[in-house]
Image: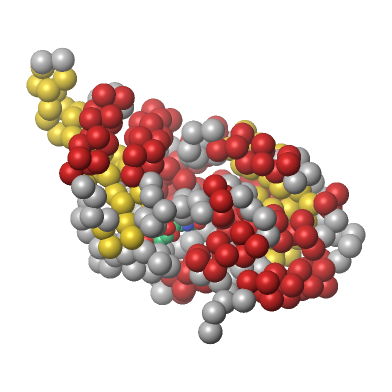
Amino acid sequence: MAFASTRFINEKVLELQKEIGSNAKTMIATSGGVDSMTCVMLARRALDKKNITVLYLNDGLMREGEGEEIKRFLKTVGIELQIWDVKDAFFEGLKGKFDPEEKRVAFREVFYKTLGQAVKSYSVDFLIQGTIAADIAETQKGIKTQHNVLSQIGINPAYFGLKIVEPLRELYKHQVREVAKKLGLPRKFAERKPFPGPGLATRIIGEVVPERVEKVRKATQIVESILTSPGTFQVMAVLLSDKATGMINGKRMYGDIIVVRSVESKDALTASPSKIPWAKLYKVRDKILAEVPGVVKVLYDITPKPPSTIEYV
Ligand code: XMP
């Protein structure tokens, strides 16, 4: 049976009104991704705008200009985005961490500590999270600890004095996009490719430090601008921790290795590599070599999921 997005919206609006009521204060932390932005649009329909705080934590791990783009859109629907600059706390937490799961844990700890501070400072009663069905399935299977499935990673929301609401937990990504469009979210948000909570940190093997994030951010912009197409699930650039010998200014030297990954998928549970024409890959390669300092190799990843995951960390 086809997914009935209008019915879903009507039901969820009623549920939110019943659960949260007309006086309680609600917060949504958004990264600009379709899941959290759909939560914002649902909350806006169900609740009084003056009781909703939408927060963007600038953790230093997001893509170029994301906060400002979200702020501009939300203004058009009458919501003032709160932006907190918390880069230093995240880089401090990630310093000296090399193990992938340790990095995720460090990210999560800083994220919830910061969110805890925000919840307190805005006196919030409810936190709406954009957890979707794939997050829950993968966390249950132990494939990855998704930071937005709190109870499953041993975090007790009551500790922060708030209740968690997850209105999208039954939906898969394509259904969230349908709901998003029905709610009037512009295509650039509704069709936005998934981007992980820990941001560019999932695309850095080894230590996450500002200079390395800057390289991945630049490479990400290049890869996304050339390879993004409506059918493609996700495209990314990854910085490896190994170095390779190359020639920079006519001299043999050790340089960075960037991996380009583009995958086709419906629900992120399985994925296959995109069959990209050589000409496009060459374009990506040339731009990365010209614009990301210190890179001597650009590789294309042809691994499906499974056995690979989509991200590298
Ligand atoms: P993996 O790498 O597990 O990714 O195959 C599956 C999908 O989930 C995204 N992803 C995350 N999203 N928080 C998120 O919100 C996370 O910690 C996280 N880790 C991976 C990934 O980008 C892909 O779309």
Tell me if residue 252 comes above or below residue 230 in the rendering: above
Residue at screen point 37% across, 55% down: 232
Q: Ligand 1 is in which quadrant of the figure?
A: bottom left
Colouring mode (rainbow / by chain / secondary structure / one colour) = secondary structure
Q: Residue 66, how many percent across, how many down? A: 55, 38
Q: Residue 118, how many percent across, how many down? A: 71, 45
In the displayed image of the protein, which residue is found farthest to the right?
Answer: 23
Q: Is residue 223 left or right of residue 253?
A: right
Residue at screen point 50% across, 40% down: 62
Q: Residue 284, how many percent across, how many down? A: 27, 36
Visible residue check, residue 21: yes
- Give the image quarter of residue 304: bottom left
Residue at screen point 74% across, 72% down: 10
Tell me if residue 77 comes above or below residue 306 in the rendering: above
Visible residue check, residue 100: no
Residue at screen point 54% across, 79% down: 2
